[in-house]
Image (cartoon, grey):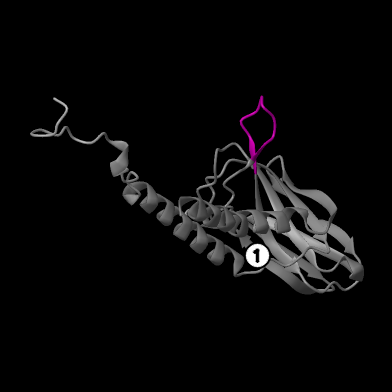
Amino acid sequence: MRFLFVLILLAGTAIGFVYPWAMSNFSGHEIGAWRVYDQGRFRPVTVTLKAGDAPVRVLVDLTAKAERIVSQQRTVLTLTAATAGRTVLASTLQFNHADNPRQVSPQLPDKIFRDEAGVIETVSPGTYLFTAGPGDADDIPIRAVDLILRSGAGEIDQRARPVGYGLMAVGLIGFLLTLAFGGRRPENPNSKPPPPRWGRGSST
């Protein structure tokens, strides 16, 4: 049973964490990356997209001098995308779930945190204006912000994380219960020598 609960825990980890992370970072191919914040200033960027690029996943990398982002449900950044005078994406970014940031360099304390701004499902050929801006979490030591676009990105099944978390909980609780109540195997009564016999007929 213990091995079964370990398998359930591993399956939950794969569904709840590995699958969404892989879909966000590796599905489709990268169109390009653009710096939208540097040296204390935000700047809009214009990107030309084709109909064949759809769906386009919009990712944001935030470089900060911090071990982790603690925004306490506040908005760290905002991002909008517009084409032909029409807004096709508007997102607020908190970076709360970026638990494993990338390190810029072993010699620098800066870390890179990634968050997803959303997916542009349908792309009309033309230029798209991406505009990043500050949120209300003004105590984050931001160094740089980069916009990353991925073409042909697969859609993450929204049921994956709840199912994965549920399996992880079942696997972990079951594993701990087997440790607590598994006990030792009962001893074989035949493994002990028979008690000495006294009285008539004994060898003593």
Q: Is residue 56 left or right of residue 194?
A: right
Q: Which residue is mark 1?
A: 91
Q: Quadrant of residue 28?
A: bottom right
Q: Where 122 sits versus 137, above or below?
A: below
Residue 147: x, y in percent?
76, 52
Q: Residue at x 69, y 34 (%)?
A: 104
Q: Give the position of the C terminus as an image quadrant.
A: top left
Q: Nearer the viewer, residue 120 or 15?
A: 15
> In this rendering, does residue 43 appear at all?
no
Circle 1 residues within 10 Å: few <14, some 14–19, many ≥20: some
The residue stretch that appears in magenta: 102-112
> In this rendering, does residue 110 appear at all?
yes
Residue 172: x, y in percent?
45, 53
Q: Where 128 sits versus 190, above or below?
A: below
Name the magenta segment's main secondary structure.
loop
Q: Quadrant of residue 136?
A: bottom right
Q: Where 125 sits versus 174, above or below?
A: below
Q: Nearer the viewer, residue 35 or 185?
A: 185
Q: Where 193 sits versus 52, above or below?
A: above
User: Label 1 is placed on what type of residue?
Assistant: Ser
Q: Nearer the viewer, residue 52 or 80?
A: 52
Q: Is residue 198 magenta?
A: no
Q: Is residue 153 left or right of residue 91?
A: right
Residue reaching furthest to the front? 201
Q: Nearer the viewer, residue 73 or 99?
A: 99
Residue 48: x, y in percent?
90, 62
Question: Disc 1 on helix, strand or loop?
Answer: strand
Q: Is residue 104 magenta?
A: yes
Q: Residue at x 28, y 43 (%)?
A: 189
Q: Quadrant of residue 39?
A: top right
Q: Residue at x 56, y 44 (%)?
A: 140
Residue 153: x, y in percent?
79, 63
